[in-house]
Image: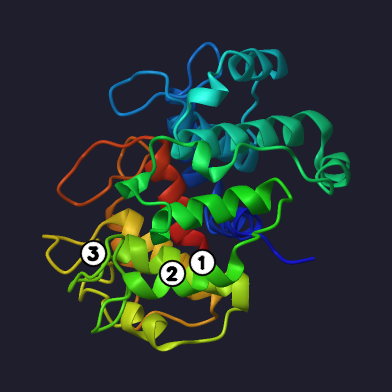
């Protein structure tokens, strides 16, 4: 059976957890718990309950061993307006459903149940897509991950790979918009992950282009014009390079460490001093991908 992106992510998060001593792990876990509500949901940067952030919170809770109420999880999921969610939030909802089952049933029974395809909405049913484009690398990455998580097949494999070429930038890398001259890290990671999952993780030129964009600080920027490297771009690039079994040019540990705040969370960049569960996810992912 092919290893899904979500399984690769989970393994990497556990790798990050293993790198932490007991004191560091306690500090990280306490921060995650500080972002949890009485209803066992999680808040966004504004302190509001958010489905997208809850998907990160539940995933981190599972990895870190933080207790969540089964009844509260079920109640929250039942209240979601599933048919009106945009693609990003629908994917977050489905991940929450799967995490709820995993925490409820245990790993073995979950894996047995997960062998059957789950019914999901069609991609054309979403009115709001990233970049308003059904073929952009980021949109297709989210959709591919959703298909994998729910044991559904990508029936447009050939078309997806052909369409990706329209987003490739001449000098290397990809953009989420067609016919652009500047590549973006988010789009390049998404495109290379799609290619890897559909065709196998065989080193290609765009992978080495991405590797060579590493900043002298050890981090990776969102794009050429970004003022500083950020944790999201760094974590996702390291994760992708791990999938392809290649290493970064420069050491990255000090860059990641510099983003770890006294609160126990991770900041998005060195220009910020706040955190949330999304960036704890990226911090732990980056550590696991070292």
What number is the disc on residue 221?
A: 3
Q: Position of residue 237 (x, y in %)?
A: 40, 67
Label 1's element?
helix
Label 3's element?
loop
Q: Position of residue 125 (x, y in %)?
A: 52, 36
How far, Cα to Cα, is label 2 from label 3?
A: 25 Å
How far, Cα to Cα, is label 1 from label 3?
A: 26 Å
Q: Which residue: 22% across, 73% down? A: 215
Q: Quadrant of the N terminus?
A: bottom right
Q: Position of residue 47 (x, y in %)?
A: 33, 20
Residue 60 vs residue 164, the one in the foreground: 164
Callouts 2 and 1 close, C-beta under 8 Å? yes
Residue underneath mark 2: 163
Q: Which residue: 18% across, 43% down? A: 272
- The mark nearer the N terminus, 1 or 3, is 1
Residue 206 vs residue 277, the one in the foreground: 206
Question: Is 53 situated left or right of 230 in this image?
Answer: right
Q: Position of residue 43 (x, y in %)?
A: 40, 23
Between disc 1 and disc 3, the foreground one is: 1
Q: Which residue: 69% across, 29% down? A: 100
Packing grade of label 2 (10 A; few <14, some 14-19, many >=20) is some
Give the tally of numbered discs: 3
- The mark nearer the N terminus, 2 or 3, is 2
Residue underneath mark 1: 160
Packing grade of label 1 (10 A; few <14, some 14-19, many >=20) is some
- Residue 223 lies in what quarter of the image? bottom left
Image vertical order of residue 104 relative to residue 184, above or below: above
Question: Is 229 situated left or right of 196 in this image?
Answer: left
- Residue 113 lies in what quarter of the image? top right
């Amino acid at each position: 059976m092919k290893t899904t992106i979500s399984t690769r992510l989970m393994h990497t998060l556990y790798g990050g957890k293993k790198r932490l001593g007991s004191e560091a792990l306690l500090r990280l876990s306490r921060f995650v718990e500080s972002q949890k509500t009485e209803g066992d949901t999680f808040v966004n940067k504004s302190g509001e309950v958010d489905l997208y952030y809850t998907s990160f919170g539940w995933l981190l809770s599972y990895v870190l061993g933080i207790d969540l109420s089964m009844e509260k999880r079920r109640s929250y999921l039942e209240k979601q307006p599933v048919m009106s969610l945009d693609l990003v939030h629908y994917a977050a909802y489905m991940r929450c459903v799967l995490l709820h089952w995993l925490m409820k049933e245990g790993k073995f029974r979950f894996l047995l149940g997960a062998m059957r395809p789950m019914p999901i909405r069609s991609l054309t049913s979403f009115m709001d897509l990233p970049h308003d484009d059904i073929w952009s690398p980021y949109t297709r990455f989210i959709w591919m991950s959703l298909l994998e998580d729910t044991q559904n097949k990508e029936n447009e494999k050939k078309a997806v790979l052909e369409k990706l070429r329209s987003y490739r930038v001449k000098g290397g890398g990809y953009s989420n918009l067609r016919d652009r001259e500047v590549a973006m890290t988010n789009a390049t990671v998404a495109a290379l992950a799609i290619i890897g999952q559909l065709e196998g993780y065989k080193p290609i030129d765009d992978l080495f282009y991405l590797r060579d964009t590493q900043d002298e600080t050890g981090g990776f920027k969102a794009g050429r014009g970004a003022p500083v490297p950020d944790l999201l771009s760094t974590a996702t690039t390291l994760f992708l390079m791990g999938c392809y079994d290649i290493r970064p040019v420069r050491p990255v540990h000090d860059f990641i460490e510099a983003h770890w705040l006294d609160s126990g969370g991770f900041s998005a960049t060195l220009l910020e001093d706040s955190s949330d569960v999304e960036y704890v996810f990226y911090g732990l992912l980056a550590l696991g991908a070292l």
